[in-house]
């Protein structure tokens, strides 16, 4: 799929979907079970702020050698009625020299294709998060991302659904990657199919109680 980006074209969304939707060995993930509202401070402030979130663990997505080399250890994700929340756990200290020159990126495929690029400073803080969208002329546009971003022990993101062009009931497909300064993607999770999030409708909580 990198060939599409090299020639400046969008990756067709169908390439991110499994050929067989219920295939054995699909990327492990658990679904959000309630609304969340975590403190965006780059730390796991309390266990409970992410306890109702969905999760994806890279520990179960490959062999032992691959797991030892992965910088991304896990992804947590959830929402309130207005925002998408994403937490990215790293297997290395975000202030380590190995992170120098690297950025963490959150990519969305639906409802529109975008990339939020977050460079990490030597002090572990996020520097100038940039939202890349496709213009009407199909050219990438770099905009200052309208959200809350913080990196300390983990990377935490709070993005308005409006920034992602997502409305209640819409489906958001996303994945996370590590990118070098030259634009080369060195790591991506999930590997096979993106994480799916359904933007909650106003009856989301009442629906939970009725199940």
Image: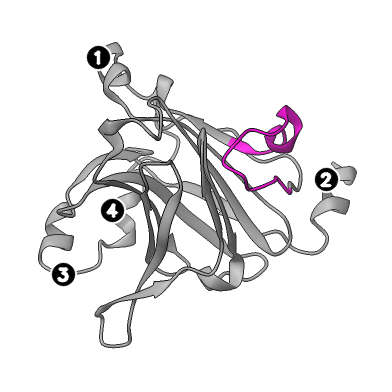
From the viewer's perspective, is residue 15 above or below residue 64? below
Secondary-structure class at tag 3: loop
Q: Would you call the spot at circle 4 few (<14 residues within 10 Å), some (14-19), or many (20 or more)?
A: few
Which numbered dot is residue 8? 3
Q: Would you call the spot at circle 1 few (<14 residues within 10 Å), some (14-19), or many (20 or more)?
A: few
Is residue 64 or residue 42 the one in the foreground? 42
Indicate whether residue 197 is drawn in magenta. no
Secondary-structure class at tag 1: helix
Query: Which residue corresponds to mark 4?
Result: 15
For the point 44% across and 51% down, which residue is it? 126
Query: Which residue corresponds to mark 2?
Result: 208
Which residues lie in the magenta part?
A: 37-54
| Contact (Cβ within 8 Å) of mark 3 with mark 4 | no
From the viewer's perspective, is residue 186 above or below residue 3? above
Measure how far apart labels 3 and 4 are at the Cα level.
Answer: 16 Å
Q: Say left or right for 196 vs 206.
A: left
Measure how far apart labels 3 and 2 are at the Cα level.
Answer: 43 Å
């Amino acid at each position: 799929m990198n060939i599409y980006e090299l020639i400046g074209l969008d990756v067709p969304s169908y390439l991110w979907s499994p050929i067989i939707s219920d295939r054995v060995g699909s990327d492990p993930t658990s679904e959000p079970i309630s609304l969340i509202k975590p403190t965006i401070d780059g730390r796991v402030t309390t266990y409970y702020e992410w306890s109702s979130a969905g999760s994806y663990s890279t520990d179960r997505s490959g062999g032992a050698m691959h797991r030892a080399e992965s910088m991304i250890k896990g992804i947590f994700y959830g929402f309130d009625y207005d925002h998408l929340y994403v937490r990215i756990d790293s297997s290395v200290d975000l202030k380590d020299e190995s992170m120098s020159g690297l950025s963490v990126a959150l990519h969305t495929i639906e409802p529109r294709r975008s990339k939020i690029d977050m460079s990490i400073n030597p002090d572990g803080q996020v520097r100038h998060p940039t939202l890349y969208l496709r213009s009407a002329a199909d050219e990438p546009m770099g905009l200052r991302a309208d959200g809350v971003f913080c990196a300390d022990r983990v990377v935490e993101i709070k993005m308005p659904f409006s920034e992602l062009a997502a409305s209640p009931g819409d489906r958001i497909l996303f994945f996370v990657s590590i990118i070098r300064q030259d634009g080369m993607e060195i790591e991506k999770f999930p590997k096979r199919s993106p994480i799916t999030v359904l933007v909650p409708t106003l009856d989301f909580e009442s629906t939970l109680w009725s199940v």
